[in-house]
Every structure is written in structure tokens, then in C-alpha cells.
Amino acid sequence: MIEEPLKTPLLRVKNLGLRHLSASGPVTILADVSFDLGRGEILGIIGESGAGKSTLGNVVLGLLAPEFQRTSGTIEFDGMSTEAMTASAREAIRGRRISAIFQDHTASLDPLMSVGMQVEETVLAIDGSLSRRQARHRALDLLTRVGIPDPQRRYRQYPHQFSGGQRQRVVIAIALAGSPDVVIADEPTSALDATVQKQILGLLRTLVDETGVSIILVTHDMGVVSEITDRVLVMRKGQVVEQERTAAILDNPCHDYTRKLLAAVPRLRIPATAANPDDRQSRTGATEEGDRETMLLIAKGVSKHFSQRVFPWSRAGSKAKFALRDVTIHLRRGTITGIVGESGSGKTTLGRIIAGLDSAPSGRITIGGRQFDVAKSGRRSGLLGRVQMIFQDPAVSLNPRMTIGETLRETIRFAAATGRNDAPADLASMMDRLGLPRSLLTRHPHQLSGGQKQRVCIARTLLARPQIIVADEPTSALDVSVQAEIVDLLKDTVAERDLTMIFISHDLAVVQQLCSSLYIFKDGRVEDFGPSDFIFSQSRNPYTRSLIDARPRRFTC
Amino acid sequence: MKPAMKADILKGLKKPPLGPVLTASKILLASYILLAIAAPAIAPQNPYDPLQIYGWEASSPPGTMGGGGFRYLLGTDGLGRDIVSTILYGLRISLMVSVTSAAIAALIGLTAGVSAAYFGKWVDAAIMRLVDLQLSLPTILIALIAIVTLGPGIDRIILALIIAQWATYARIARSVALSETNKSYIDAARLMRLPTARIIFRHLLPNSIAPAVTLIPIEVGHAVALEATLSFLGLGVPIDKPSLGSAVANGFQYLLTGQYWISLFPGLALFGLIASINLVGEDVRRSLDPRNHPA
């Protein structure tokens, strides 16, 4: 890296304006955006969906669809204005001096090409003078640097043989192939589990420290920003709200919007008070025998596996992969129980079995003393409909061709008749209670915001008058500021209506706000369980500890 | 993918517009439909009424003055029926048969495909093997077998065309419904314990039919051709009520003796009908296809 005087930043974006030419007229996407990026700096660009943060990254990369039109401003790279450059000069910069990492590590790699070849190919594309041998050497070098263990052996493997985190490491290696000056990372860790996210962020920081590359990190997650960025650009509706050093923003945000974003990030409390070491015994161990009365739902010994065999005669993959392995959970009446785990841990599978949507070969579910055989389909065993669910993505949870009113009235007509709760099903008061304007009743789902859709889903669930609700990551498809509202709403609802809830999540802090007891799932098994306070303050389970440690320190107190 | 990028790619994929040919086909098709509806009013003769037909005027060349007080503009056929009137009445039958059969085939096919996707397991296997069987045989063969088994008659023709066509709809509807079934609004509907028929017809079907519905206009064109083929082979509509296909077949034997008009004019009418339905159908399909309306 050539040392340059610090006065000229590597990248300078000045008064950038951008609009999108759509059928209904031009829409402003970016307005008057200015920022500098220094060498060896990590600049975070944070904002909610629609803030224009990804588009900003694409402008810098020079990847814009023709419908986008720049209305004002300049981009200077290394002292040269990009407008003044010829097309071929801009081409030469993109991919070599400015490269990118995208969110979806699966889509970023070619599934039919070995991982090593993909890195090698990029190396060759950037420097055609290298021989195959040299390119391979350099590719191995890159794989080693991004922390792929045993790169010699893994060179010939294909993307599906790598875990998500390793795939993202390979994507990073490819982005680094041309020794770029700037890497634009668009939500590089959003598709990864918390513990893996922590490792990838650590890798990015190390790379910056070692090679002096600069990174523009586009994200919606304050936690990510707090972990590794030097400076932050807060964006809202295409405008820069605030631009400051990370520490300053976190400690002393000047703008209301930044404050709101920060406040919306759930914080994990580590209770200092050392509770009685026998706490877990006294509070959950006894449940097995003692106070069976207070347990509304017991799922016992639930197992489910997916056969991995491709053909009936193939031997290699004939080992069944367990989605759930002898899982037992208890739900205390009137409480919220959390199920936490990373992707693939079986938490959603269990939720669907409890709701009667899926069956499992072995296991028993007892609700209020009545037993249900989970091997039968939910309709046949009578389990279906006793437990309602709130789903992860409100965008696909409502029939797009029915109005909100039709959806909710259908629920009253069919589900409320079989409801187990006594509260009357009243549409209007339900809408009012959930903060939904009645005018929405005649709208279709696509005319609603994400938060409104999720409220409608909650309304539908409540109108069915269940005793037990399974909420499957109900906030993870929503913007941060809306997440907090939905969490509060769920909490109030459970208290008001004396409901019992299972809250499935990957986010410890959200679970802590809501849940009185917790189950931690790993690879289809209950890894740890107990009252929420116990888990966070005293659990010695190494996996639980690693989950807690993966939380951004800034938001743990 | 960003909607803007998608729009851009789709623009490249879109075929060039059909332009004046399309406008001409639209006008042609519209006049066909009008003529078919108005046939009893405007046709100079009722070819189904033996009292209006004079046997001694059989095979008159175009332009002959007839005993009914009007000129046979396109001549008469071997039985003495006015070709103009035969075409107008034949048009009615061809259109009625093909539209009815395409609509019913779509209804059955869509329901079968969506049900296969929703129920899965053996229901899916049974329906889809039937579809495979059906699609592995040539359409004309299936229609032939159906007619031979069921016997002749307009209702039987419609039935045969339905049997020959439903499978295409079923296969397309199933593939879409499979991905819709995985969306949580279907799970929600099951949790509400909605009756299964309601889940299928109110929730799954309306969200799965769009790609299959775009097929209907094209399939109507196929049905016209298929009906004409069957009638031409003598297996179609009864001889005293000719469709366009059987009108062509009626004149076949006279071609060698130079009485070309008996087959030629119904044939031209049939050609124009199928061509205009296909062109307009393709245009309707494109405008119905949701992929052509980004976001």
C-alpha cells in the first residue's frame, strides 16, 4: 500500500442526488449525500429499509440500472472524479480497486464450480499475466487469510460442502482477490447466525488492520455498527441524518432519529444478583412431577428426522438427519416461554408440531390434561387449531387476494366458533386495541406496511381465541423500530388475555425482554433450559455462554 | 433482485410487438364472433332446414342464382347447401365447442392440479400419474379414443376435448400451488380450521391460477383445430350440423372433380379463425402474464 497524505480521502462523495424513473414519475432515492472514506477505515452506513443505503453502495460500485438517474453531485476516487474517467477506466476500477461482498453467500458463489477455482478465476481475471500456478498459489493464500482451515484440501470442494460462515469467508476472499482499496459490504452478516456473525466481523476488522483496505459496511443492525466501524453514516429516506465517529454516535447521538434507532436495539441484561444455585431445580425441575397443574402444555420426547437418502438404494447418505431429538418442553400457564437457537436447530419444527401443522414419528403433546398423538396429522388428532401461530414473514402470512376485513371475518366465522377462550370475538375493538385504523379493513395486504401486516396477523391469531400461541420469530422480518412495538404489543396481549406463549427467536435480548423461562436449542436438542434470569446470569453451559458472548458488547449491560 | 433490474431484463426478453398483424387479427376475430352470433339473422339460408335446401342445386359454382331467391356467393356443397350459410353456422358450432371445452378443461385441470399440490402424498401421485399418462399420448389420439368410446354428438366432442386438454392446466397449476402451499397464509388457514374446500378454492386456487389462466386463449385455438380435425376425420359433429371442420371434409371428395369451392372456402374461414385466435390469444397471454408487469 502506498502511503498518501491523509488530507485527500480515498473516496469522496459530494452532494450526491439520485432518482428512480418509474412508471408513476421520478422518485428521489438519494438527496444531497456527502461523505469521505479514508484509507484503512470502516465506514458504517445504517438505516432502515428504503433508506437508500444499498443504492448508495451500488452507486459507488458503479452498478446501477438505467432507470436510476444521477441528479447532482460527484464521486471522487483516489483524487480522480469518476465522471471524468473513460468507461474503460471505470471498468478497471470496479472489481479491482473497489469490490463488493453481498448478503447472500449462497447466491454469490457458483454451485457447480469448486471453491478454489472460483477464487483462482477471479485472480486470473484481474491479473491476466499470472500463470495458472501463480494464480493457484495466490488463491490458496487468500483462502488462508480469510481463515478457511486446511485450504489445500478444501480447494477442490464445492460451495454446498461449506457452512454459511465459510461460504461468506470465500466470498470475502474473492472480494480481496484484486487487493482492492475499497470493499463495499452490503449486509455481509445478516444471513448468518449470531456466533458466526461475530467471527466474520472479527475477520473484516483484522483484514482492515493488516492490509489497510477500507470498508463501507451497509447494514440495518446497530449491533454490527457498534462492533467494528470507525465512523457511521445514519441514513433515512435517502438523506444523511447524522455522520459521526462510532463511539460518539453511540454515546451521544445528536439526532432524534439516531436516538430512536439506538433505543430500539434490544439490550441484554446480565443480572448481577447471584440467585440461589438450586434455582433451576426449584423452578423447573420440580415441574416434572410436582405442579403438573400449572403446566398448560407439555411436549414430551418429540423426535423428527429427515431422510437424507437420495435414492432408495443409496448407502452413503442413508443416515437420517435429526431435526428434533427427544425434545421435552413444559409451558407454564400464563407465561411466555422462549425457544432460542441458531438456524437449523429445530426450533421452528417444534413450533409447527405443537401447532399441529406437521407431524412427528414419536412424541406426545399434552394440553391441559388432554393427550395428542403427534404421529397423526393435526386435523385427525384434533391438535390443529388448539394452538395458534404468528409467523415470521407477514408478507406471506396474509392471502394477497383477500382484503384485511375478509381475512379477519373469515377467522371469526370459522375459527372463533371452535375457540377455547371466553373473550368475545369483536373485530372493531380488536382493530382498535392493536392500533390498526379501521380503514385498513377494505385494503389488500400489499397496501400495508410490514408492521401493520404483522399486527393484522396478531389480530387474526387473537380472533381465533386460542389459549396458546406460538410466535415464530415474529419480528425478524421487520425494521428495528417496528420490532420493539410488536414485542411490546405481544407482551401486553399475553398479560391482558391470560395467554400462554412460545416465543421462538434467535435474538437473546428480545427473548429476555419477554420470556420468564427459556429453552436453548442446538442441533435439534434442548441444550440448556431454565428460568430466564438463571440462564443469563448463571448457566455454565458453554453453548449458552457463547450465544451470550456473541451479542454486541455495546448493547449488553 | 431489484425491481428496476428485473424490469430491464424483462424488457430485453419481451418479443417484438405484433403491430398491424395483431390489429388485423383483433378485427378479424371480432367479426368472426359477431358473425357467429348473428348467423341465424344474416345467413341467406338455414343449412339445418331441409325445406330451404334444393337438392338439384348441389355443387353449384360460386355466383349461381339459386331457387331460394338469392345468389350462392360461394357456391353450394354436395347436398345443395349454401356455402356462406354453412360457414356462418359452422362458425357457431366451432366456437361454442372450443370455448366451452377450454373453459371446462381449465376448471377441472386447475382444481386437480391445486388439489394435488395441497394434499400431496397419494392424491398427488394419483392425479399426476394420470396427467403423465395423458400427456404422453398425442392429443388427437386421446380425443379419437374418447369419441370412439363415447359415440358421436356435439356434447361428446366437448367431453373429448376436455379429456384431451385438462392435463396441461393441471401440471402448471400444481407447480405454482406447490410453492404457494409453503407460504404461511396457507398454514394460517389450516390453523383456523377452515374447511379444506375453502382453503383450496378461496386461498390456494386464486393465488395459483394466474400462469395457467394465461394458457386459456391459446388452448381455445388448439380446441378449434382439434375439433376441426376430428370432424374432418368424420368423428366429430353430426353430418347434418356441420362445423367448419366437417364442412371442409364434405367437399373433400369433390376436389378431384374441380369443385374446389366446397372445401376451399370453409377451409379459408377455418384458417383465419385459428390464426386470429392464436395471435390474439398470444397477446392476451402476454398481457395477463404477471412477469410482464414488474412490481
Image (cartoon, helix red, strand yellow):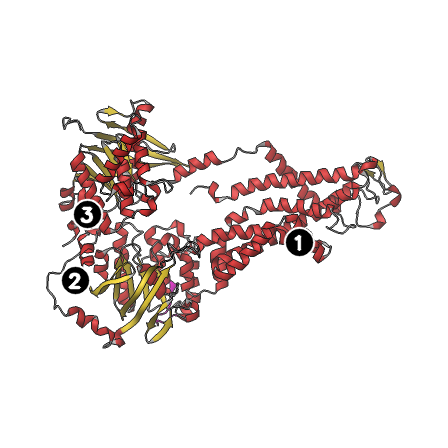
Relative horizontal placement of residue A444, taking residue B148 as reference (left or right): left
Residue ID for mark 2: A539
Are tags 2 and 1 found on a single chain?
no
> What residue range appears in magenta?
A419-429
In the depicted structure, whether residue A92 falls above or below residue B284: above
> Chain for mark 3?
A
Q: Is residue A522 magenta?
A: no
Measured as percent of width and height from the top left, residue A499 is found at 29, 68
Picture quadrant of residue A536: bottom left
**Whole-number angstrom distance, CA of label 3 to CA of label 2:** 33 Å
Measured as percent of width and height from the top left, residue A109 is found at 34, 41
- Helix, strand or loop at disc 3? helix
**Of A135 and B34, which appears nearest the observer?**
A135
Residue A259's label in the rendered image is 3
**Whole-number angstrom distance, CA of label 1 to CA of label 3:** 70 Å
Using a 10 Å C-alpha cutoff, classify the residue at mark 3 as few (fewer than 14 neighbours), some (14 to 19) or many (20 or more).
some
> Chain for mark 2?
A
**Of A15 and A278, which appears nearest the observer?**
A278
Using a 10 Å C-alpha cutoff, classify the residue at mark 1 as few (fewer than 14 neighbours), some (14 to 19) or many (20 or more).
many
Measured as percent of width and height from the top left, residue A408 is found at 41, 61
- Helix, strand or loop at disc 1? helix
Is residue A86 something that shows in the picture?
Answer: yes
Instruction: Please state which amino acid type lies under the numbered disc 1.
Output: Ala
**Whole-number angstrom distance, CA of label 2 to CA of label 1:** 71 Å
Residue ID for mark 1: B160
Q: Assign the C terminus of chain B to one quadrant of the image.
A: top left
